Image (spheres, rainbow, N blue to C red):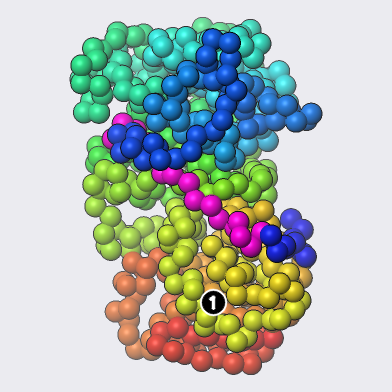
Amino acid sequence: MAAQNIGLDRQDRHSVLLYGAPFRSHSRIFRGLVKTMEDISLPDLPTASDGSKLLPSYQKNEDGSARFVMVLPAAYYEDPGLSLLARSEALHCGYEFPYRRFLDQHLRAGDLFIDIGAHFGIYALSAASAPAGEVRVIAVEPDPHNVRVLKVWAAVNKRAEQIEILEAACGASPGRTRLWSSSTMGHQVGDERPEDTISDAPAAEVEMLTIDGLLRERSELAERRVFLKIDVEGIEPEVLEGARETLGSGRVAAVIFEKSEAYASRERSAALERVSYELRDFGFDLWWFPHLHMPSVLMPWISGDEAGNILAIGPALRHSASLPDLYDGPACSYFSPPPALSECCGVTYDDDARADFTEKLIEAKASDGWRWCRPTNLQEGAEDRAAMVAEFLPQSGSLIDVGAGTMELFRALPISVRYTPLDLVRYSKVTVLADLNQGHFPDGHWDFATVLEVLEFIHDAPELLHRLRNAADRLILTYRTRPEGRPNELKSRRQAGFVNDFTADELRDLLQTAEWQIEELRTDGNITLVLAS
């Protein structure tokens, strides 16, 4: 993780962050996005002889060619899900980049990838074209239209023999069920019509199978290591219930499954919590990437207001899966993550809920990735923090900005300073990915380190201060201290997401214990500023 002397040049100063459009989750979000997407530029895709649009995958072969090509209808932009897919592949880092990157890093020749809710096949083709080669794929998709397109994609990319396509739903037990349609990415199964389906669309009767059942019928696959991906509009727990035999076999290396707006209700939230405990009982650890589409750090998943994908990692991958730069990728223009459940579904997420979530983070010693993947949270107070420390900033040399966020500090530095931003998400081409609460820190040495209102979110503050002592000659730090004799402040600090509660004197002691020599320490209100060497 060498990061020393990585920096931005002059031309990068005008293109640090470019903001994209909101991401859809399910049908309610689809409706709100249709109007928004009318104002967003779409990629200029090549056209096939029949008028279809050809979308090259963001993933590339060693020679730079696309690993596969996706065939889209000419009016693909009328479907919010397909519009999202096209824009993320052509204009950003790729649809659900970090999870596909995870597969690239861990799939091996001879593995079996099972894609439940395959849609048109972007995950199926990603696995089939993985660098390791010779990955067997089973793609399960209930919607007849989607299956037709899935077969076209497999054939066009010469993967028809490698990808077995099953037109069926998947759940807890085999049988028949009803399929209710919305957009191409928004259909659901069940006996009763969901609120968000197309009102005049009749249900289709489809086969329901289980993962355990389909594997029992394919004894020739019995020795293969298994990767599962499950995206089934809110019945992920039922699909996993139908995979208990497989999950307990020790064959499953990892499971990618979605947490969507379907889990906003108390009933479905309880189902997700139950299956999370069951996965842990099977020996899986639960992780996630805080940004669904951009390169970011793999980190422990703690259930809160977030939406996205959860990644259950089995024992065989546990020790190799969480290296901070393993899933890194190129910088791209910013692409918004899914909306929070409280934003799209009316779920109450008030100060008490935020405080409770912070307590969960403290218990797990985990970071709040959802908070730090959203620029609105990063921008709050950033200008004020930069202004507060402006007089101490260097005029030359090198500086590492720990918890750089939107890099407001970078804008305040002279061009002669070599700047290294550190954060959970790749917000620029020189960002160093790290989760401080997992003990990540890059190799290298800097003249200065800045830690501006970051220490409040660190579980092992003494350890970070020791690491900084070894990495930098001088330290500029700001911290929201707890006033002496005011224990009632603790609740408001948890509501703000703070996981520790040092007074100014306690902060001084921590710095001195880490062998920092304090040159200046001053407190203005509840903010303490420290300059140390």
At a point 35% along the width and 16% down the height, the residue shown is: 173
- In the figure, residue 81 lies in which quadrant? top left
Q: Is residue 290 above or below residue 279?
A: below
Image quarter (top left, top right, bottom left or bottom right) of the N terminus: bottom right
Of 66 and 76, the residue lying toward us: 76
**Residue 27, horizontal then vertical, whole percent:** 31, 31
User: Horizontal placement of 530 versus 449: left or right?
Assistant: left
At a point 36% along the width and 72% down the height, the residue shown is: 493
Of 299 and 384, the residue lying toward us: 384
- In the figure, residue 411 lies in which quadrant? bottom right
Of helix, strand and loop, which mostly describes the magenta segment? Answer: loop
**Residue at disc 1, secondary structure:** helix
**Residue 240, horizontal then vertical, whole percent:** 42, 27
Q: Is residue 465 above or below residue 204?
A: below
**Can residue 19 be found in the magenta stretch?**
yes
Image quarter (top left, top right, bottom left or bottom right) of the C terminus: bottom right
**Residue 213, horizontal then vertical, whole percent:** 45, 12
Other-residue count near label 1 (Cα within 10 Å), few / some / many at <14 / 14–19 / ≥20: some
**Can residue 479 be found in the magenta stretch?**
no
- In the figure, residue 268 lies in which quadrant? top left
Q: Amino acid at mark 1?
A: Ala
Residue 472 seen anywhere in this rendered image of the structure = no
**Residue 445, horizontal then vertical, whole percent:** 76, 70
At a point 50% along the width and 31% down the height, the residue shown is: 85
**Pointer 1: what residue?**
386
Question: For the magenta stretch, what is the residue range?
Answer: 12-28
At a point 52% along the width and 16% down the height, the residue shown is: 52
Residue 399 seen anywhere in this rendered image of the structure = yes
User: Horizontal placement of 184 versus 458: left or right?
Assistant: left
